[in-house]
Image: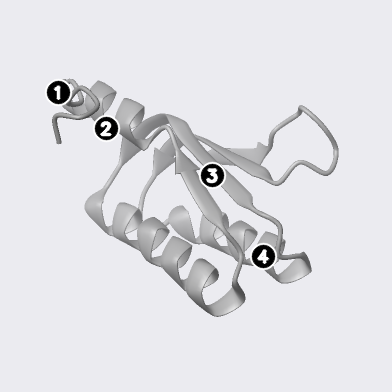
Amino acid sequence: MRFGFSPRERHDRTIVVRGELSQSTSRRVLNKMHGLANRSRGPITVDVSGLSYFDSVSLTMLLGTERIIERQLGCPVDIRGLDEATSRLTGLAPEPAGKR
């Protein structure tokens, strides 16, 4: 699993996750999220649209960490691309907006 800062700008607070996110690799992403939140309270974006695999434990850990950072540290976290990754990996199309 590879992850890193988006190349758009040096101080970008986007974590781009590509490849496989499993219980054994998700800790690196969660540590990166905590590190960004502890340095400043600006919003963090986690882009998971490039995932080729994720398991339920790693997804639960990611969403739980999002809530902890937002509630305890007051730092907004935006997880992007989850619908796209889920539909690609499961073969199911997401529901149209307004139909949920």
Q: Nearer the viewer, mark 2 or mark 4?
A: 4
Residue 86 tag number? 2
Amino acid type at mark 2: Thr
Amino acid type at mark 4: Ala
Q: Mark 1 or mark 3: which comes first in sequence?
A: 3
Q: Mark 2 or mark 3: which comes first in sequence?
A: 3
Q: Mark 4 or mark 1: which comes first in sequence?
A: 4
Residue 46 tag number? 3
Q: Mark 2 or mark 4: which comes first in sequence?
A: 4
For the C terminus, the image quarter is top left
Identify whether 65 is placed above or below 3: below
- Residue at x 24%, y 26% (from the top left corner): 97
Using a 10 Å C-alpha cutoff, classify the residue at mark 2 as few (fewer than 14 neighbours), some (14 to 19) or many (20 or more).
some
Q: Going by the image, does 40 lie left or right of 51?
A: right
Using a 10 Å C-alpha cutoff, classify the residue at mark 3 as few (fewer than 14 neighbours), some (14 to 19) or many (20 or more).
many
Residue 58, x across and y down, in percent: 34, 55
SS at circle 1: loop
- Residue at x 23%, y 52% (from the top left corner): 56
Q: Are marks 2 and 4 in contact (CB under 8 Å)?
A: no
Q: Mark 2 or mark 1: which comes first in sequence?
A: 2
- Using the numbered discs, state the Cα–Cα distance from disc 1 to disc 3 in whole angstroms: 22 Å
SS at circle 4: helix
- Using the numbered discs, state the Cα–Cα distance from disc 3 to disc 4 in whole angstroms: 12 Å
